[in-house]
Image (tube, rainbow, N blue to C red):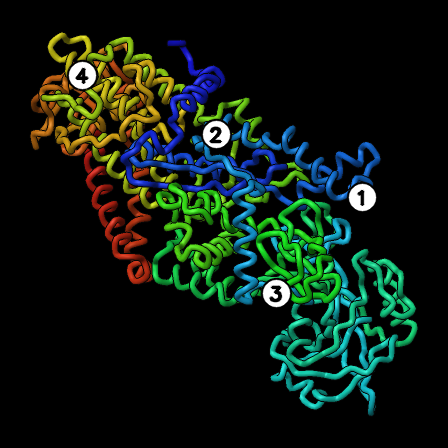
């Protein structure tokens, strides 16, 4: 083996070996119980970012462990066609040649997109391979695959036939730059300092006016009412009266509606049903006219009178100017508010009334809510259920049509002669109403989320009754960030239950977002985004994976620090060196056959085997609760603090003893064997490499998961280790060279010390041991561990005066701590409010401190 761990050398050779061996396919365990995960499909335009690295690392540790446990573990990879994102990418490429998609025409443009995908669309999947993610590439899917497109059409037609898809005029998010409706997840809200314009709306009859406040005064041109809350006494007499719309002199009513917030602005709001979702709903409840005053180019329409043709922001200033000129402007205040921007181009989104296709979601939400309430699908952590319920219970109908060319075409045709709407899975040739053959397909495509919501079952072959669908659906778990619970998870639940009658997954494991160390969001625009592939280049894929897994507490954001990955790389080097030590002292024949454990182990061997069994059991418990950070934190600490720092050091003496060496070699072999297995899901490359050094030519990726039997170690091990630590500290505090031998007398009233202690005290603390009563007649220092005391003659070893000073300082410090604890216990508020176990722990702390101070005083007396 090389002297040091080189991640790049290790990680370059194993992926192809695994893939060629068929290790990523569930068929590697043909008789295993099925376990399945579908990857949240990244955009085909995308590159791997830190969020992907976290999300996919979690999925990989799940799938690798289940594979080793004998499950037929399937992890389905794939990518999303990403309608607007992909179309924008290709349009930018064409623009470099001064060509627009309209120059090419729809058919040729779509060909260009397919050509781009063939050339550049696999970048993210190559990056997934670099990270070591063990997806079954033989089952890779794309949301535009023929089978998945069949599923899209089938679901659309079925929902339409049941009245759950309809075409109508409703408020949507419109991007004036991309010229399409966009989904909520494609709107990025940014906090901005804007202006709240207060406008006087005079009554038609009598004196007086109502003041309304708006951040978008240009939309007042489309107002058809002013609304107040029915419980607002300020406007009780105004409800039902008519007011005159400033600038346009249109008479509009004052209506009472519970959708109005009493606290916002003046409590009275302008109602523009064609340009605001809440206003649209108020308009529907009160039968208000819908007047569109902003068009698809974000310009004022002819309905805007003198402002027609102006850009919306130009019109905003012009409207304010005219209001002031005519005496309708009361005042303008600075106002912090959230403004929606198109995530693809940054343009401010315009809420707009538009004829689009919608899904009627309410009937679909009921069974999806019941599934979670009744426990058929679990959220982990459970608290995310409340967010899910809130979203589901307040969901508006979903706009699914997009004015794009790249995407699943809406399977709807219009008869050019009679206007009949024909919705069908197959291309129709004749109108069923008038038998005309002149039919035109709807030019729009479906929202990308419409196809991705079918992902858990469409990737398994639905609507065909395939073997994969029967065996692996419903899937076992969905791993995802909390940011898409609403946009993707909720929709998968709804359509999964609707289409298959089953929940698409049993568990939903939610993780947080990757943030900067100070908690800020990572983004390219802020210049603080990290490229995971650059981190892989610096530290390796395994260290990055391990550092992300260890930091990912369920449901919490990850304030990523690059130092974590550097520490994980150093841990890899420590593991590498442990295996180097092992292979220098043992051969594969020394390791019991896979799953076997040594017979008749010595004290240190039985101790580490006991700890191995305890840690493995606790690791499995934490893992099954999706507490990956706790599981790998536990394993990391066990490996470093107990195996590397203690057992390997204790084993060195045994390996030099011909009688004890065989069982120690066997113990060392199985401990490292099982450590490699336990760490494999998180750091697969390094563990596979080390397995090849320790193993018998088999692959670790398909080795069985460890199940060490319970073992019983010696009772005094922890006390002996504590004693060694304290003796080492004594050397350090007194600057005694490790090479200087120290003779100690060990007093052990409770019989904790055993004969085998002597070897370890000599090897690890440099002390020769005599058991018995404390020596008399000369200055000594005492080192205390539990009830065991080690007496160290100081003559010729340390400066007695300095030792007195040290003891006095230790007593003073101890008394200060003791006084604080006693004061805390004397405080009635602490005793009344703190949990009982906290109070009890503080009482134990006082008793221990009392005892320790007494022993320190005794040591001081012994010095004379």
Q: CA distance from mark 4 to mark 3?
A: 73 Å
Q: CA distance from mark 4 to mark 1?
A: 76 Å
Q: CA distance from mark 2 to mark 4?
A: 33 Å
Q: Residues within 10 Å of mark 1 (few under 14, many from 20)?
A: few
Q: Which of the marked residues, 2 or 4, is nearer the chain's N terminus?
A: 2
Q: CA distance from mark 1 to mark 2?
A: 45 Å
Viewer can see residue 809? no
* Element at label 2: helix
* Element at label 4: helix
The residue singled out by tag 3 in the image is 166
Looking at the image, which is closer to me, 461 or 79? 461
Mark nearest the camera among 4 and 1 is 1
The residue singled out by tag 4 in the image is 664
Q: Which of the marked residues, 3 or 1, is nearer the chain's N terminus?
A: 1
Looking at the image, which is closer to me, 142 or 519? 142
Q: Which of the marked residues, 1 or 2, is nearer the chain's N terminus?
A: 1
Q: CA distance from mark 3 to mark 2?
A: 47 Å
Q: Which of the marked residues, 4 or 1, is nearer the chain's N terminus?
A: 1
Q: Residues within 10 Å of mark 4 (few under 14, many from 20)?
A: many
The residue singled out by tag 2 in the image is 544
Which residue does the image show at 24% across and 18% down from the upper left? 669
Q: Residue furthest front?
A: 435
The residue singled out by tag 1 in the image is 102
In the rendering, at what x and y percent does residue 312 appear? 82, 60
Mark nearest the camera among 4 and 3 is 3
Asked if residue 112 is positioned above or below residue 317 in the image, the reply reads above
In the rendering, at what x and y percent does residue 597 appear? 17, 24
């Amino acid at each position: 083996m090389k002297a040091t761990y080189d991640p790049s050398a290790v990680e370059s050779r194993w992926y192809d070996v695994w893939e060629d061996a068929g290790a990523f396919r569930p068929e590697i365990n043909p008789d295993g119980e099925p376990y399945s995960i579908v990857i949240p499909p990244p955009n085909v335009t995308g590159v791997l970012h830190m969020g992907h690295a976290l999300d996919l690392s979690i999925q990989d540790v799940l799938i690798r462990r289940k594979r080793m446990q004998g499950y037929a573990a399937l992890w389905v990879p794939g990518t999303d066609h990403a309608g607007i994102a992909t179309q924008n990418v290709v349009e930018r490429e064409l623009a470099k040649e001064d060509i627009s998609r309209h120059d090419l025409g729809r058919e040729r443009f779509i060909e260009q997109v397919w050509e781009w995908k063939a050339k550049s669309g696999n970048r993210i999947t190559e990056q997934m391979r670099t990270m070591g993610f063990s997806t079954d590439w033989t089952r890779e899917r794309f949301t535009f695959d023929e089978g998945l497109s069949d599923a899209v059409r089938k679901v659309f037609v079925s929902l339409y036939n049941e009245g759950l898809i309809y075409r109508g005029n409703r408020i949507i998010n419109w991007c004036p730059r991309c010229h399409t409706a966009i989904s909520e997840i494609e709107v990025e809200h940014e906090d901005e300092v804007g202006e709240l314009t207060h406008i006087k709306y005079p009554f038609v009859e009598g004196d007086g006016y109502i003041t309304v406040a708006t951040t978008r005064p240009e939309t007042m041109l489309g107002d058809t009412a002013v609304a107040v809350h029915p419980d607002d006494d300020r406007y009780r007499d105004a409800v039902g009266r008519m007011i005159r719309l400033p600038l346009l002199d249109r008479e509009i009513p004052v209506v009472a509606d519970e959708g109005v917030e009493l606290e916002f602005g003046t409590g009275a709001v302008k109602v523009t049903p064609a340009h605001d979702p809440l206003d649209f709903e108020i308009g529907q409840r009160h039968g208000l006219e819908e007047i569109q005053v902003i068009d698809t180019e974000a310009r004022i329409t002819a309905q805007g009178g003198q402002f027609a043709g102006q850009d919306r922001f130009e019109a905003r200033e012009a409207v304010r100017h005219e209001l002031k000129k005519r005496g309708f402007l009361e005042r303008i205040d600075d106002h912090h508010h959230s403004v929606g921007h198109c995530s693809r181009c940054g343009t401010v989104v315009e809420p707009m009334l538009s004829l689009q296709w919608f899904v009627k979601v309410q009937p679909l939400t009921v069974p999806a809510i019941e599934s979670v309430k009744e426990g058929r699908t679990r959220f982990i952590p459970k608290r995310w259920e409340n967010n899910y319920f809130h979203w589901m219970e307040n969901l508006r109908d979903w706009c699914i049509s997009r004015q794009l060319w790249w995407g699943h075409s809406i399977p709807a045709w219009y008869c050019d002669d009679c206007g009949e709407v024909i919705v069908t899975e197959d291309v129709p040739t004749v109108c069923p109403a008038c038998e005309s053959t002149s039919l035109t397909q709807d030019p729009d495509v479906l929202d990308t989320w419409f196809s991705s919501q079918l992902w858990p079952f469409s990737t398994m072959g639905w609507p065909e009754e395939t073997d994969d669908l029967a065996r692996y659906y419903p899937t076992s778990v969905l791993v995802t960030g909390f940011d898409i619970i609403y946009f993707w998870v909720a929709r998968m639940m709804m359509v999964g239950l609707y289409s298959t009658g089953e929940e698409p997954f049993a568990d939903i494991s939610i993780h947080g977002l990757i943030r900067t160390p100070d908690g800020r969001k990572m983004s390219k625009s802020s210049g603080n985004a990290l490229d995971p592939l650059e981190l892989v280049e610096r530290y390796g894929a395994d260290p990055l994976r391990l550092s992300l897994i260890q930091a990912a507490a369920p449901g919490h954001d990850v304030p990523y620090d690059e130092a974590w990955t550097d520490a994980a790389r150093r841990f890899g080097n420590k593991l590498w060196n442990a295996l180097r030590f092992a292979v220098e002292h043992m051969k594969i024949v020394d390791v019991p056959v896979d799953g076997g454990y040594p017979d008749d182990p010595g004290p240190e061997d039985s101790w580490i085997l006991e700890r191995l069994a305890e840690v493995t059991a606790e690791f499995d418990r934490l893992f099954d609760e999706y507490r990956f950070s706790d599981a790998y934190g536990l394993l990391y600490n066990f490996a470093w603090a107990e195996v590397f720092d203690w057992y390997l050091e204790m084993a060195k003496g045994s390996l030099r003893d011909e009688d004890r060496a065989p069982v120690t070699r066997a113990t060392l072999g199985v401990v490292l064997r099982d450590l490699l297995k336990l760490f494999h899901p998180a750091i697969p490359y390094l563990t596979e490499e080390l397995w090849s050094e320790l193993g018998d030519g088999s692959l670790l990726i398909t080795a069985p998961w460890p199940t060490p039997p319970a073992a019983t170690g010696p009772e005094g091990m922890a006390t002996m280790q504590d004693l060694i630590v304290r003796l080492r500290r004594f050397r350090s505090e007194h600057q005694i060279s490790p090479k200087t031998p120290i003779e100690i007398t060990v007093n052990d009233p409770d019989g904790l010390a055993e004969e085998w202690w002597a070897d370890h005290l000599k090897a690890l603390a440099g002390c020769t041991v005599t058991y018995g009563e404390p020596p008399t007649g000369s200055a000594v220092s005492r080192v205390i561990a539990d009830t065991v005391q080690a007496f160290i003659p100081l003559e010729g070893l340390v400066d007695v005066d300095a030792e007195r000073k040290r003891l006095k300082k230790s007593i003073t410090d101890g008394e200060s701590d003791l006084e604080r604890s006693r004061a805390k216990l004397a405080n009635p508020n602490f005793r009344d409010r703190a949990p009982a176990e906290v109070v009890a722990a503080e009482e134990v702390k006082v008793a221990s401190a009392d005892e320790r101070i007494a022993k320190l005083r005794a040591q001081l007396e012994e010095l004379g």
